[in-house]
Amino acid sequence: MSRLYLLRHAKAGWALPGVRDFDRPLDAQGIADAEMMGTVMRARNYIPDITLCSNAKRARQTLEGIAGHTDTGRVLFFDTLYSEDAAGYLAIIRGNGGPGSLLVIGHNPMTEDLALAVSGDGDEAARAIMNHGFPTSGLAVVRFEGTLTEAAQGAGYLEAFLTPADL
């Protein structure tokens, strides 16, 4: 059994003139939400063996907030997690996953699209919450029977979906 944690980066401020979208930092609420999500992940024993993180500033800062409150395992950064679609995310996960657990800190709509695509079944309450959208700092917890190298559309079970508003 393996677990995939899909986390949308925390809330970021709007881009200022001359600042690329890639370089937008978290705002105060985003920093607080990332720290809270790290605390919740530790309390629920959602501890990844490996973390794949977008190289965008807001994703890196989300990782920093989480890492201050829980273990994130080995961390790998990918520029492509900023630009790939859900299929690209799945390819990156397959290429870096294994029998354990993996956290992906990425962006929408890719994170939401992937969570919906791989969750063939799941906890009714979690599915109901996720059907209302995938907010910043939202965390989907998807369980797979095999390793993450074999993760595929519809093969996962959505165990939980957590958002800052629900914690």
Image: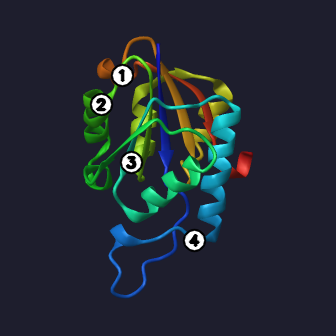
Q: Residue at x 29, y 30 (%)?
A: 96
Residue 72, numbered circle: none
Relative to the observer, which residue lies in front, 122 or 75?
75
Callouts 4 and 1 close, C-beta under 8 Å? no
Q: CA distance from mark 4 to mark 1?
A: 33 Å
Please report contact status of discs 1 and 2: CB closer than 8 Å, yes or no.
Answer: yes
- Residue type at mark 2 is Asn
109 sits left or right of 67 in the view: left
Say whether disc 3 or disc 4 marks the residue closer to the N-terminus.
Answer: 4
Provide the residue designation for mark 4. 27
Q: What is the C-alpha distance between the residues marked 1 and 3?
A: 16 Å
Location of residue 11 (image quadrant): bottom right
Residue type indicated by callout 4: Asp
- Of 21 and 61, the residue lying toward us: 61
> Which circle's residue, 1 or 2, is located before the other in the chain?
2
Give 110 or 11, whichever is nearer the viewer. 11
Check the picture and name the quadrant holding the C terminus: top right
Residue placed under numbered mark 3 in the picture: 53
Q: Quadrant of residue 32?
A: bottom right
- Label 3 element class: strand
Q: Position of residue 63 (x, y in %)?
A: 49, 51
Distance from disc 1 to disc 2, alpha carbons, whole Å, reads: 8 Å
Q: Residues within 10 Å of mark 3 (few under 14, many from 20)?
A: many
Q: Which residue is mark 2?
A: 96
Residue 148 is labelled as: 1
Sequence-first disc among 1 and 3: 3
Label 2's element? helix
Task: Identify residue type, mark 3.
Answer: Cys
Q: On screen, 101 above or below 164? A: above
Residue under the point 56% across and 41% down: 139
